[in-house]
Amino acid sequence: MIPFCPVPNRAKILIPNLMNSRFWSQVVRDLTPYVPGEQPKIAHLIKLNTNEHPSPPSPRVLAAIRAELGDDGAPLRLYPDPDASLLKAAIARRYSVTPQQVFVGNGSDEVLAHAFMALLKHEQPILFPDITYSFYPVYCGLYGIAHRAVPLAADFAINPDDYCHTPHGQPGGIILANPNAPTGRLLPLAAIERIAAANPDAVVVIDEAYIDFAGEGSHSAIPLTARHDNLLVVHTLSKSRALAGLRVGYAIGHADLITALDRVKNSFNSYPLDRLAIVAATAAIEDQAYFQAACQQVIASRQRLTARLTALGFEVLPSAANFIFARHPKRDAGQLAAALRQRNIIVRHFKQARIEQYLRITIGSEADCQTLAGALQDILGN
């Protein structure tokens, strides 16, 4: 049976010394905030913990920003287009949908936050895996949304049947990261379509932050939105477009879903994207040749790093993302992460049941990957 998780008061356990402020609302008292990847200021750091792209963005991005600024930066005195029409049109062309099927926001995290409020807040609990993007339960806590954590299989795969035939009837909604994070495992499109078809009265959100690193063939669920009006697909420009510092995300789905997102957005912040973000993101979307070459570079590096770590005795899960998830059967993951840190190499270690012996390692530059492999060989040798 899937365990019921009604959004607990975990913050009192995590930060008891901060729970006495008389100014805090009950919502704040009950929250367990998301903890982002560490951003240390260390010289000569090899940073492999936050899944940033090893290459810079398309040169067209910088050209678009310079053109928008002009000689004196005067355009910055004006508000941006609240609908980001230029960017929506570019995304619509890229995926052969209409602009009315596109929503844009300040990073995919904001897009997801609006989706939780606009589309997933219902009477029934929503479903997502027990091991997945850890922001999902945070949104549930923020908006008062009950959820059920669905256990992944022993090999960390998502079982579609767990979302098609639930013991409590149709859920209030479903959200799946694909490829999943932090495992990197890919759910086939046929499985996503099964889940959407089995839950016609619930919105199914597919968070495709890493889908562009899945390799050959079409893996995005965006084409399925033409057949399933309950399917919303969310993308980010932070990963495959190398624009983590710009904060742009978008969603594609039926126009009714997009209207709901717009209603929440316009009740929260009607100008989520600034003028520079709009033109830069548009340029990144339109430069397909640069985008595809950069993705292939990461995929090739991922394959080489996987082979290197396997040769060192690591067990590496099959990854369709710009990171790998690996464990060494004879060495503690926390100790390995600490030893790497002493060598100015940072990876992500999750102190969470079932995955506490795994490290999530971002695919950095080829030089970074070689340095990491050499450091691990030295650590294991000692």
Image (cartoon, grey):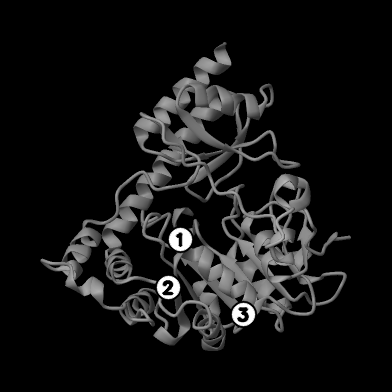
Quarter of image, res 139: bottom right
Q: Residue furthest front?
A: 22
Q: Is residue 290 left or right of residue 266?
A: left
- Label 1 SS: loop
Residue under pointer 3 = 118
Residue type marked 3: Ala
- Label 3 SS: helix
Judging depth in this view, the residue of 21 and 247 nearest the camera is 21
Distance between the Cα atoms at labels 2 and 3?
16 Å
Judging depth in this view, the residue of 1 and 350 nearest the camera is 350
Contact? badges 1 and 3 (CB < 8 Å): no
Residue 62 in view: yes
Distance between the Cα atoms at labels 1 and 2?
33 Å
* Mark 1 or mark 3, earlier in chain: 3
Name the quarter where the N terminus is drawn.
Answer: bottom right
Question: Who's the residue at 29% across and 54% down the image?
Answer: 57
Name the quarter where the C terminus is drawn.
Answer: top right
Residue type marked 1: Gly
